[in-house]
Image: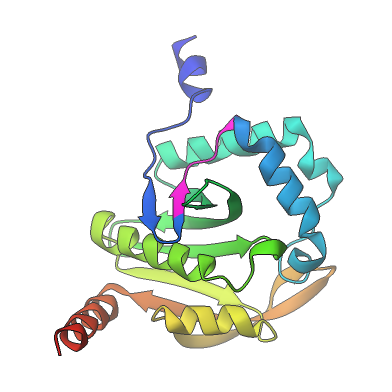
Amino acid sequence: MVLLDIAMKPPDGPMLVRDPVALRVAEYADYSGWTDLRRESRAHLARWEPAWTEADLTPAAFRARVRNQWRDIRRGRALPLLICRREDGTLVGGIDLSKIRYGAARAASVGYWIGAPYLRRGYARAALEAVLDHAFETMRLNRIEAACQPENAPSRALLEKCGFQREGYARAYLKINEAWRDHLLYAAIAADRARRREHCSVMEMR
């Protein structure tokens, strides 16, 4: 019974803040906002995400999704967070550190999405910068990997602005919108992040 009670409660996940967003762990009460935004953004998201249907938007599916996220956070396997507008808490998207590995690798993969009404407002960049800071400085990871389709110019630009470097090209990497899609492979590493931050600090002092 104690295990059931623990499983039904959100874990003590981080609250990451970087204007204009705040990142937090999902709760059951986010169902309406999350579902409405996903439905409203379907045409946009379908181009870049694995297929999903109305069955994935039911209350039961959302509760299962959230419970799985809580379990992964507690086990240290992933860190899925909602992206909210800091000024009023409006849900604008999501970001996820997954496949977290420690030991010799100390690495993870990152993925993100922004709802169609909130594109090109700086929310994705702020969220990704906040997650990178947390991954490298708090979690002490060494490498964060990402992938995006070659046609997704905004995502490519975002990764490169945040210090990711292109490392490869993966053919038929993920099935997106009923077809196997090639992806560009990117990575950011802790040493590059530290040098980038040091360079920014020097420039600000001049």
The answer to whether 130 appears left or right of 138 in the picture is: right
Most extreme residue toward the top is 1
The answer to whether 168 appears left or right of 45 in the picture is: left
Is residue 78 at least partly visible in the picture?
Answer: no
What residue is shown at x 70% (from left), y 63% (from top)? 117
As drawn, 106 above or below 172: above
Q: Nearer the viewer, residue 96 or 30?
A: 30
What residue is shown at x 44% (from left), y 12% (from top)? 2
Magenta region: 22-28
Q: Which quadrant of the figure has residue 31?
A: top right
Q: Quadrant of the C terminus?
A: bottom left
Q: Position of residue 57 (x, y in %)?
A: 78, 42
Q: Position of residue 103 (x, y in %)?
A: 28, 57
Tell me which colouring the rendered structure shows.
rainbow
Q: Is residue 135 magenta?
A: no
Q: Nearer the viewer, residue 173 or 132?
A: 132
The answer to whether 117 appears left or right of 189 in the picture is: right
Q: Nearer the viewer, residue 171 or 88?
A: 88
Q: Which quadrant of the figure has residue 196?
A: bottom left
